[in-house]
Amino acid sequence: MAKAAQFDDAFVGEKPSMAPSMAHLNLTEELRGSTLSLNKRSMVLDEDRFEEQFLRCNICKDRFRNDSLPRMLPCHHSFCQKCIDHLYRLASEQRQSYSSSIRPLASSAVSINCPTCRSNFVATDETIRRLPTDHRVVQLMDFVHHTDRYTVTFCSKHSLQPLNFFCEPCIKPVCRDCTVLDHKEADGHLVMDLEEALAKYTPVLDNAITELDAESICMEEKRIALESVTKTIDKVKVDLLGQVKACMTRMRELIDEREKALEAKVYQEVEKERAKLTEKSEMLESRREVLNQQANKLKTAKDDSNVEEMFRIHQEVREYRAGPPIRIREVDDGLMTSFLLNTRDEAMLASRIGSFGDVTTKVETTSSRMKTSVKPFVYRSSSFR
């Protein structure tokens, strides 16, 4: 990219003469084959480089303005007044640091070196205030301000050749040299003027831009609708977690009820068996008491030498003991009744619980608002062919 500027009749006042100090500017002949049909000479230059070299202070890099005009030193190099004052102040401070025996006779004169060429000159407050304005730079400022400018795109393959033509088969702008070397009509390339190509394809490009804008709007509407669906999904997640919790709560309630039933069964069966053992123990205790009473009676009759009473009691004991003996299975056979928890369905229930419940997907229609607000978009590409 470069800037092409018309400079005929562009100055307000007298036109500047091209001084030797400006001879290094990159001036070109009038752009031949330009689609802009200029009747005046044109100058092609790098505007940023031009501004950096001529329109900015070489010390602070600020651009010269009407309230900060360039001041020219005796060596003809220009700087802004603020930077020149700074140079003078630094030189004055350095002079004050010298001893009185080596200071120059002129009390206010200091030696200043030009930052560009290092030329030395003696200056005072008066000479600094009276430095002339560099009217060459002022004219260049006026030139840039009043010059009509336009941007020229150059060919990347051929130096300083503007892209003034358009090759339809290749769909690319080309320069004059490209039409002769790389895009010959004899090789099937159809080359037309760039302005003609712009006039021909601008409606196509406008249509493509319209379609892209419409598709962009459609994408934005869909994005907004998708945000609504996302919020709905978040609500579904909350509802689904509630359902899972409720289901598991019901399952835990059923398990708790079964646990209580089993505990009640344990108490019932164990207490029943305890009652049987208690009954047997009471029976044994009753028999033991009868035997102890008979033994005591027999012992008393013996002590009293009451033969008749001894034989009568002995006969009663024999008749009592002649009955069936008392058998206690827990003692005589070494067997007792115990209990265990029958978990025959535990493995099956564990398997069923491990796979109990699932989260599956289903397809639902979105809200009617979304269906009516978002319309399907069909992209129709615009071809250059």
Image: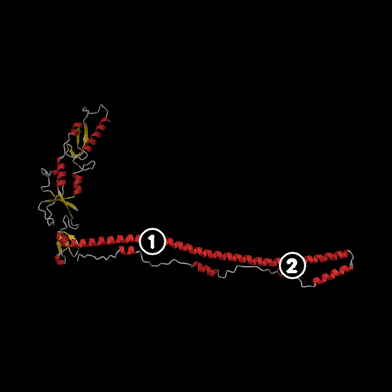
Q: Could you tell me residue 123's position as x and y percent?
A: 20, 33
Q: Residue at x 70, y 66 (%)?
A: 277
Q: Nearer the viewer, residue 33 or 307?
A: 307
Residue at the spot of label 1: 232
Query: Please, is residue 223 above or below residue 117 in the view?
Result: below
Q: Nearer the viewer, residue 45 or 352?
A: 352
At label 2, the amino acid type is Met
Residue at the spot of label 2: 283
Q: Could you tell me residue 371's position as x and y percent?
A: 32, 64
Q: Could you tell me residue 239's position as x and y percent?
A: 43, 62
Q: Residue at x 22, y 32 (%)?
A: 110
Left or right relative to 144: residue 356: right
Local SS, label 1: helix
Left or right relative to 358: residue 330: right
Left or right relative to 302: residue 278: left
Q: Earlier in the sequence, mark 1 or mark 2?
A: 1
Query: Please, is residue 333 above or below residue 4 in the view?
Result: below
Q: CA distance from mark 1 to mark 2?
A: 76 Å
Left or right relative to 237: residue 30: left
